[in-house]
Amino acid sequence: MQVLALKYRPKHFSELVGQESVAKTLSLALDNQRLANAYLFSGLRGSGKTSSSRIFARALMCEEGPKAVPCDTCIQCQSALNNHHIDIIEMDGASNRGIDDVRNLIEQTRYKPSFGRYKIFIIDEVHMFTTEAFNALLKTLEEPPSHVKFLLATTDALKLPATILSRTQHFRFKKIPENSVISHLKTILEKEQVSYESSALEKLAHSGQGSLRDTITLLEQAINYCDNAITESKVAAMLGAIDRSVLEDFFQSLINQDEARLQERYAILENYETEGVLEEMMLFLKAKLLSLDSYSILLIERFFKIIMSSLSLLKEGANASFVLLLLKMKFKEALKLKALDDAIVELEQSKESVLKPINQNANAPKQEPKSAEKIEKPEERENAETPQTPMLSAKDRIFHNLFKQVQTLVYERNYELGAVFEKNIRFIDFDSQTKTLTWESLAADKDKELLRERFKIVKSIVDGVFGKGENIKIALKHHLENKSAPEETKEFKFPPLKPQPTTETTAETKEKETKEKETKEKETKEKETKEKEIQENEIKETKETQPKEAPTALQEFMANHSELIEEIKSEFEIKSVELL
């Protein structure tokens, strides 16, 4: 019985599998009589290079030709089919690679064909020639006699000198697609009357790696092993491959967090070579990606990256069992990671849940404190020292966000200044009519000196963000002064116990109290005037030194927060909002 690879070898260009472009070009060249002196066929093993060379040689020798479809009945075709044509000379480049072999070949080209139309030299594995042999062949290959044709075949065209490549017509045989291989295997099995499973043929085609000859050889082996009934499980056992059901259970138990079943499937995978397991996993994930009941794309991508890192560890010489165990542990960790979009959605939901009660309290009507409640407790006064950002309305939120932009810009300009500014300065209010920004300062000692020295930088940024380049007034509210105010009221409301004065001394005590009040009022007025003078001097200095800028931070903010602007319109019954 003849071997299947030879029995079903193509005899015409139409029978070539997966090489339609090569077959079409050679057929038209024969029909149009546009023939070259030398042809080079390169490609993967078992892709049809030698078969195409023999078909092309027989087409040239046919008595009715040269034509694309030889008759197969004349003497020339019959002798070529039986591989004993005297003028079709086949050489193996691996065993006849020296300069002496090439000299003998050149000597034969001098004689005319004894039986056919041409003298054809088919040289297989031509890349095995030595450099001297290639150099000896150059002249003959470029200008051979009219009755000589060269057909060169190789699996590695890059090893050929450029001088050889330039003297030949190069045809590249591509890797045969698995679908074409499977359809060809089905036709062979139908002719041989062998039952089969399509999944088994898929395994055979994948193991062939694009080589039709290798796949047909495996098919013949499978026919013998399966006893004329090819099944996937038997083919997997023959090839030493992993059954698909094992991988299905492994990944399903991994996703369902079934530790017992996962350990069972992992024990089965340990019986195979780790590299083969990783390759089978990639094929399984590829099939899952194309199927309807696929895993999420993000999860498949994570699994694929883990497999690739495991393959790189194997190439570096890591222990195979350790790599497989590490693979399983990484798969478990990959399931714990959340998608970025899901994390963002959860963060936004948590933020909304936190802000809702704050906004509800802010929008509630304020109750004026009673006179008896004006006295603060020590605990309340300590809590009041830590400033909190009020969330009253959409307008206030806009101003707070603008103040945050000022903080970030100060950070970008000077990191040290930005840290001190963020630590000590608290936003109080912004009056858009008078263009006055009020903030509270907690700075003391070195921080206070740094803020005074570099106030011009802060002022320029405030003008750019709040004033669109125009001058903004800054009202400073010192934290220490606010802190001392309630202490004064506390002493005033709770005087020390004294004996009841007589009617004669009441007038004197009243005069003393009025004098004390007047002195206190004078001191406070002097302090306020001094602070106003300092602020006006600082504003004048910044006006003289700072050039007007026209940043677009407020414009960008209004464009990105259109919803907030709509809330302002509805809250204050405003028809339009313009930039200040």
Image (tube, helix red, strand yellow):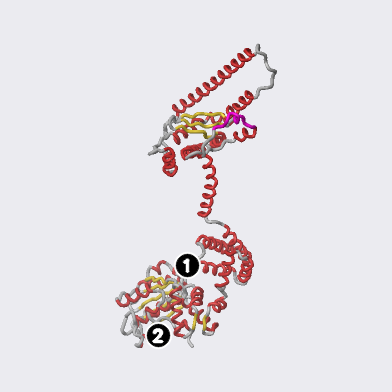
The location of residue 282, given as percent across then percent down, is 53, 67
Residue at the image position 44 percent from the left and 35 percent from the top? 464
Which quadrant: the C terminus? Answer: top left
Identify the magenta region. Answer: 368-377
Q: Main secondary structure of the magenta part?
A: loop
In the displayed structure image, the side of residue 411 where residue 264 appears, left or right: right
Residue 450 falls in which quadrant of the image? Answer: top right
Rendered view: 484 above or below 350: above
Image point 69% across, 19% down: which residue? 498
Amino acid type at image mark 2: Leu
User: Which quadrant of the figure has residue 245?
Assistant: bottom right
Q: Amino acid at mark 1?
A: Leu
Viewer-side residue, 11 vs 276: 276
Of 527 and 131, the residue lying toward us: 527
Residue 81's label in the rendered image is: 2
Write down the residue under mark 1. 290
Q: Which residue is nearer to you in this view: 474 or 209? A: 474
Magenta span includes 345: no
**Is residue 375 part of the magenta span, yes or no?**
yes
Residue 535, percent from left and from top: 50, 25
Task: Name, please, the residue furthest toward the front.
Answer: 503
Residue 571 x %, y %: 44, 39
| Residue at 59% across, 61% down | 332
Q: Are marks 1 and 2 in contact (CB under 8 Å)?
A: no
- Position of residue 287 relative to residue 58, above or below, is above
Numbered disc 1: secondary structure:
helix
Report if residue 279 is visible in the image: yes
Q: Which mark is residue 338?
A: none
- Residue depth check, mark 1 versus mark 2: number of the one nearer the observer: 1
At a point 62% along the width and 23% down the height, the residue shown is: 492
